Image (cartoon, rainbow, N blue to C red):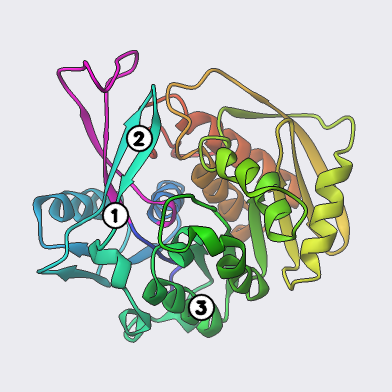
Amino acid sequence: MEFDLIALGETMLALAPPAGSALRSSPTLLVDHAGAESNTCVGLARLGLRTAWVSRLGTDAAGDRILSAIRDEGVDVQWVERDPVRLTGLMVKDPDDGVRYYRRESAASVMGSALLDAVPVEDARGVLVTGVTALIGADPHAAGLSLLTRARGIRVVDPNLRPGVWGSDRRGELVRPFIERCDLLLCGISEIAEILGAGSAGRAGRTGRAGQAGWAGANGANGDEEAHALARAASALGPREIVIRGASTIGALADGVWCEIEIHRDKAADPIGAGDAFNAGYVAARLRGGSVEEAMRAGAACGAAVTTAISDTAAFPRSI
């Protein structure tokens, strides 16, 4: 079977208090799963595309739960390896203190290129890897490069810069080779500014996934000159299509043409995962032959939908 998209990356068990509750005092926690690449696969699967997620999980209850949940979404998980020694990573969402990751020495932190040996990467219409995979360990970094090198379909990268992981102090250096090997770059404006040397690490670190929330598309008005300039600079690294998510606009440079829409951010129950949902909506539209503007609006709608629930994927729509 030909896959529309094959993605490589870590997925963690995610814990969060119910809406309106604080982690320190809530008597209950919601249990979910979270991972940039698997989130995008789930979104694409809900939209009717054929996806496969490649990763490693522990042989623990957390790994069992994640594997079952993602399989139930229609994502192919046959190339997910189980580790009898290392544990599945954990993410804790705290409304008062942000997101905490417990992923050091996780099963996914040592997934290497050999994990891809049996995966039909060359036959897929597209592949996806994010900067998270580049930053959680030397082996995952090598695996991400192997995925992009072997791919013959569209190669999609989201920098997804993160503080507090193995490669965070060299994140621009580690993520840049992914960008140099991709066709479609989906990024936040602070992330690409940092990678290109035009922004501060602190600014990009604050943006992250939570800064990609609550979107809804509107007609574009004033152009974002900074985003346009950054997109042109990024195109020199190799990508032929660059999408930049800003504070009030989303812009895309494709075939030398800049296209832009305005966005507004609604109140979010949970902003985490909105960027991944945008990516799924955008990629789905493009794989189906939609225009860049149609893809940006689809991505914005998916990103906005996801923020309405305490979950990275629960509120992802089944049509756009």
Residue at image x 48%, y 49%?
163
Circles 3, 2 touching at the beta carbon (< 8 Å): no
Q: Is residue 37 visible?
A: yes
Front: mark 3 or 1: 1
Of the image marks 2 and 1, the number of the one nearer the N terminus = 1
Q: Quadrant of residue 77?
A: bottom left
**Amino acid carrying mark 1 in the image:** Arg
Residue 5 sits above or below residue 124 on the image: above
Crowd rating for badge 3 (residues with CA inside 10 Å; few <14, some 14–19, many 20+): many
Q: Report whether 116 appears left or right of 235.
A: left
Q: Pick the residue in front: 266 or 2.
A: 266
- Give yes or no for residue 20 being in the magenta stretch: yes
Q: Is residue 290 visible?
A: no
Residue 233, x across and y down, in percent:
83, 62
Residue that badge 1 annotates: 103
Residue 66, x across and y down, in percent:
22, 51
Residue 148 sits above or below residue 316 on the image: below
Cα–Cα span, label 2 and label 1: 23 Å
- Give yes or no for residue 5 being in the magenta stretch: no
Q: Pick the residue in front: 260 or 225.
A: 225
Residue 151 sits above or below residue 248 on the image: below
Crowd rating for badge 1 (residues with CA inside 10 Å; few <14, some 14–19, many 20+): many
Residue at image x 48%, y 66%?
134
Front: mark 3 or 2: 3
Q: Which mark is residue 314?
A: 2
**Amino acid carrying mark 2 in the image:** Ala
Q: Report whether 13 appears left or right of 289.
A: left
